[in-house]
Amino acid sequence: MGGYIIKRLGQALIVVLLVTVLVFLLIRLLPGDPILLYVSGDVVSGAVSDEVIADLRREHGLDRPMYIQYVNWLWQILHGDLGKSIFLNDTVVNEISRAVPKTVMIGSLGLLLAVCLSIPLGVLAAVRRGTWIDTLVTLLANSGITIPVFWLGIMLIQIFSLQLGWLPTQGYTSVFDDFGAGVKSLILPVVCLSVVPLCALTRQTRSSMLENIRMDYIRTAWSKGLSEGLIIMRHALKNSLIPVVTVFGLMARITIGGQILIETVFNIPGMGRLAVEGLQNQDYAIVQGVVLVIAIIVTGINLIVDLSYGWLDPRIRNN
Amino acid sequence: MISTTLAADTNEESSPKHSRLNRFFRVLFKRKIVLVSAVTVVVIVFSAVFAPLVAPYDPYEPNFLARLQKPSWQHPLGTDSLGRDTLTRIIYGSRASLQVGFMAVFVASSIGMVLGLVAGYFGGIINTIIMRSIDALMSIPMMVLALAIASLLGGGLLNVIIALGVAMVPAYARVVCAQALSVKQNDYVTAFRSIGASHLRTLMLRVAPNCLPPLFIVMTMQMGIAILVEAGLSFLGVGISDPEASWGSMVSEGYAYLYEAPFLSFAPGIAIILIVFSFNMIGDGLRDALDPKLRGVI
């Protein structure tokens, strides 16, 4: 298992390094000059001369050759410095560290809710195959993955905030500041985010359980006289989990993507909002920082997914 | 069940090619929902192509006397803040969704196919370089990557297609690479090489055609994803924006008038769900018909 972990860790580091190249190139190769955008208002009024623009460019290191900019940037990152936001007048690290807890809180609660509901639902549908329960669960799961998350958010706001008045329409309150208000502000975004992973995981649990239930070792377990609960939980479910874990990794990525939309709908100042605003302002440093942090989070989740394969299936870790 | 249909077909039909096609359609439409979805897609494509004939109103002409109306006989789905008919704009919006869906999937599958074929066929260091880069691309969520590319390029139909075309490459590259890795081990590939065929000829004539079935399935399934992400981009205001009709920007506009006209953002969302659901179901059907082994994999 030790060798397996080290190998996967090495691969993850290479992926992160490639991501830094990708992010750097993405931002630099596409059109748009942040300095010109920053001073555009003043250029029109004639208040900014070419020298001032050149000074600004030098101050932000944008006058150097590309590869030097990249190496410098990478060096800074390794020292925990993601640069300064041109627009927000604060360091990128400060901005991101304010945004990350909100995004992680909502995202992980959404995924947790999805996992807690989907596995029992998927198992139930598989065990009661062909009954109305199965038909209903499958239909709901197939429809659920097609719902645009931002639209669902708006519909939930319409029902639970505007019509019933139970929950706040927008905003984010930390549960550490005000527990009641915090929980209330979390309910709608978390429910919204959980729908797609919930449906995808239910589908995968069901189909993977159906495959395993037909296997010989399940018949053996039955003929040994084990109880239904034990057969399903210990034998069928554990062997069905690998594809479910794969889908979980995929869903974690989709959930982070969905948070851009959800944070916009509910006006939550998390990573998604920061990315959208950074892009609107063409604020290189913020966009680079946010995309990089998101990519590191995703790579971390993929690493955990890979390691759990090893835990679930001894053949993988010994290979 | 599938294998018995196969046996029955080969008995009935004399021409093997005919029977294979027959079986394909029989398995594809075995589930009623797939047939219903196919009909839905055909109807939506038809109304998108003939939008000027089908739509009851002009999609761009404001009518300030009929702002934010509730659904009625004149306006079955109500009107927006400029008095434009929502049903008309949904019909025109399907043009944006379908164009982005088809074109982005085409771009992404072409790039992904080439990368996946090369990586899978040559293996070794080439495989490592290509697939690790794909991993890096994949570690940026598609929505984030598409948003970054689209907003840096500046929005609009073409830029959304480019953004999604790039952001969706990993799915194709991985599927094709995995398929190419297994196809190249077949004896017919070795045989073709041994009669003197070049790598390029072998790739094009033996390996690539056998990578197509899973590719087609992924293409159908990604149609829905492309449409969803396009709607998301337009919702954020970096995709297709007013006056062009797009379902995502219609939901966004409806959000601004949620209190006065709740129906405004409801209807385009239903349109998105309907078309994405249909493409997903067709994708499921295709998978069962083309390659049932892939059940649970794709």
Image: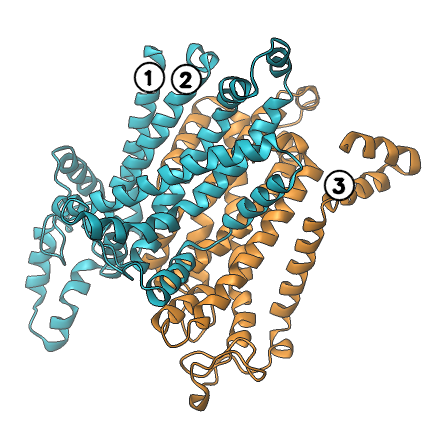
Which residue is located at x 51 percent, y 51 percent?
A146
Q: Is residue B149 above or below residue A307?
A: below
Amino acid carrying mark 2 in the image: Gly
The reply, left or right, for residue B66 in relation to residue A181 is: right
Which residue is located at x 61 percent, y 74 percent?
B51
Q: Which residue is mark 3?
A: B27
User: Of residues A23 and A62, which is closer to you in this image?
Assistant: A23
Amino acid carrying mark 1 in the image: Ile
The reply, left or right, for residue B258 in relation to residue B33 is: left
Give the percent coordinates (x, y) of residue B287: 65, 39
Amino acid carrying mark 3 in the image: Val
Q: Is residue B159 above or below residue A196?
A: below
Neighbours of disc 2 within 10 Å: few (<14), some (14-19), many (20+): some
Quadrant occupied by the N terminus of chain A:
top left
Q: Earlier in the sequence, mark 1 or mark 2?
A: 1
The reply, left or right, for residue A84 in relation to residue A306 is: left
Q: Please tell me the numbered disc located at residue A310.
A: 2
Q: Which residue is mark 1?
A: A5
The colour with which the image depicts chain B is: orange
Q: Is residue A130 above or below residue A221?
A: below
Q: Label 1: chain?
A: A
